[in-house]
Amino acid sequence: MAVIAVIDYDMGNLHSVCKALEKAGATPKVTSSPKDLEKAMAIVLPGVGSFDPAMQSLRARGLIEPIKNIIHSGKPFLGICLGMQILFESSEEGVENGLGIIPGKVRRFRPSQEIRIPHMGWNQLEITQARSLLWEHLPPQPWVYFVHSFYVDPVDKKVNAATVTHGSQTVTAAVAYDNVTAVQFHPEKSSNVGLQILSNFVSQVREKIAV
């Protein structure tokens, strides 16, 4: 079984993420211990809430440098929602520095009469990395579930794995490069499509172990 560490920093619905990972064939281990993260085969960083409290919570638990080191080691990593945003350098939501794993900034949706903020509900992805293993066995424009008022804006658009259009704004919905994968939507709330995405991640973990 693929043992995947799910980072506990009081900023996410860990129960639903773990249940989804179990259905995807993994053995999730909820932890805030750097030693557990080092032992795990892969890491999932979920998140619901605000940027600054998330970074403050990670810092209080001594997790910032361990997370950076584990990502740089090449271990498979998946960020979900806020767990994606804090991979970036900074956010318009707050003043804290992010993890700085991905160059770029988290930006606020521009208010307008044509959109609701937060962007909440089902929306279709536009796949921009067609060969990414993340999208295996999925339709060309899969529906997934979003809840967010901010979006990531990477400096290097080549890391974009998918985009989503909300009103007139098309923004990054997923990034993927090397061992790092992150999604703005909630795969654990995205029915069969979300379960398939998590299953694809688990498959990547198993392939990594087998090498």
Image (spheres, rainbow, N blue to C red):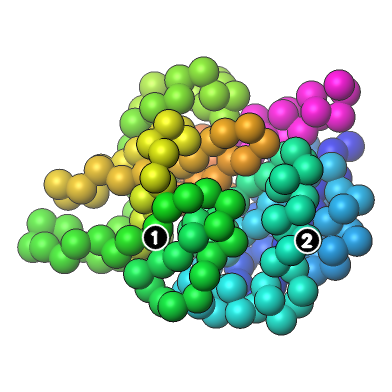
Instruction: Give the prevailing secondary structure in the magenta stretch.
Output: helix
The answer to whether residue 160 is seen in the rendering is no
Q: In the image shown, does 30 or 70 lie closer to the viewer?
A: 70
Q: Please state which amino acid type lies under the numbered disc 2.
A: Pro
Q: Please state which amino acid type lies under the numbered disc 1.
A: Val
Question: In the orientation shown, which residue stands out farthest toward the left?
Answer: 113
Which label belongs to residue 66? 2
Instruction: For marks 1 and 2, give the CA distance.
Output: 22 Å
Specify few, some or many for label 1: CA neighbours under 10 Å numbering under 14, 14-19, or 20 or more.
many
Q: In the image shown, does 89 or 138 lie closer to the viewer?
A: 89
Q: Which residue is denoted by mark 1 in the rendering?
A: 106
Bounds of the magenta span? 195-211
Q: Residue at x 57, y 34 (%)?
A: 177
Q: In the image shown, does 102 or 187 lie closer to the viewer?
A: 102
Identify the mark nearer the N-term, 1 or 2. Answer: 2
Q: Position of residue 176 (x, y in %)?
A: 54, 36
Q: Position of residue 131 (x, y in %)?
A: 51, 18
Q: In this view, does 60 lie above or below 81?
A: below
Q: In which quarter of the image is the N terminus?
A: top right
Is residue 106 on the magenta stretch? no
Q: Where is residue 69 in the image (x, y as percent from the top left)?
A: 76, 53
Q: In this view, does 148 lie to the left or right of 34?
A: left
Judged from the image, the secondary structure of the residue bearing numbered disc 1 is: strand
Specify few, some or many for label 2: CA neighbours under 10 Å numbering under 14, 14-19, or 20 or more.
some
Q: In this view, does 184 lie to the left or right of 170?
A: right
The answer to whether residue 9 is seen in the rendering is yes
Q: Position of residue 114 (x, y in %)?
A: 10, 57
Q: Residue at x 55, y 45 (%)?
A: 182
